[in-house]
Amino acid sequence: MKINIGELTERKTSAMYPNLTIVNPNDTVPVMVKILEKGDMQLLIEFKGVMKVVSTISESAMNIDKLLRTCGQLIYAKAENKKYIINDILEYMECISE
């Protein structure tokens, strides 16, 4: 059996909604992702114009608060045409209650 490395590293997936995008990734992201509560919401990072799914997390306010404290700003997407810039936990709570 022969493994095609190019195909393996270029796997693509569709965005699922809701999802959360880290706008400004930093060195703490890998550590943070490991300690977040797992769930069904995709956690995405855009790096050099490419979107990558790094994890699936719960929609818990605790998870969002941890990410906001380390990454600053997030984008919460309820649907393809419904995206919100999140700067604090209150903005997140307003978005999910709509």
Image: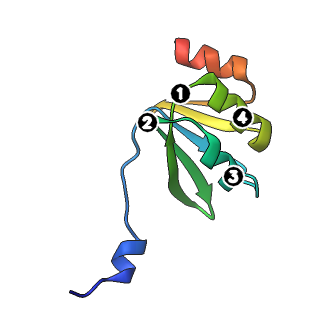
- The numbered mark, 1 or 3, whose residue comes first in the sequence reads 3
> In the rendering, at what x and y percent does residue 60 appear?
57, 25
Q: Which residue position is annotated with label 2?
A: 80
Q: State the mark number for residue 31.
A: 3
Q: Residue at x 37, y 73 (%)?
A: 8
User: Of the residues under marks 1 and 2, which one precedes in the sequence?
Assistant: 1
Q: CA distance from mark 1 to mark 2?
A: 18 Å
- Residue situated in front as seen by the camera: 94 or 69: 69
Identify residue for label 4: 66
Q: Give the mark toward the camera: 3 or 2.
A: 3
The disc, 4 or 3, on the residue closer to the chain's N-terminal end is: 3
Mark 4: which amino acid? Lys
Which comes sooner in the sequence, label 4 or label 1? 1
Q: Secondary structure at mark 1?
A: loop
Residue 38 shows in the view: yes
Callout in the foreground (1, 3):
3
Residue farthest to the left?
1
Circle 1 or circle 2, nearest the eye: 1
- Residue sitting at x 70%, y 38%: 67
Q: Which residue is mark 1?
A: 59
Q: CA distance from mark 3 to mark 2?
A: 28 Å
CB under 8 Å between discs 1 and 2: no
Q: Nearer the viewer, residue 81 or 76?
A: 76
Left or right for 34, reference 55? right
**Left or right: 59 in relation to 29:** left
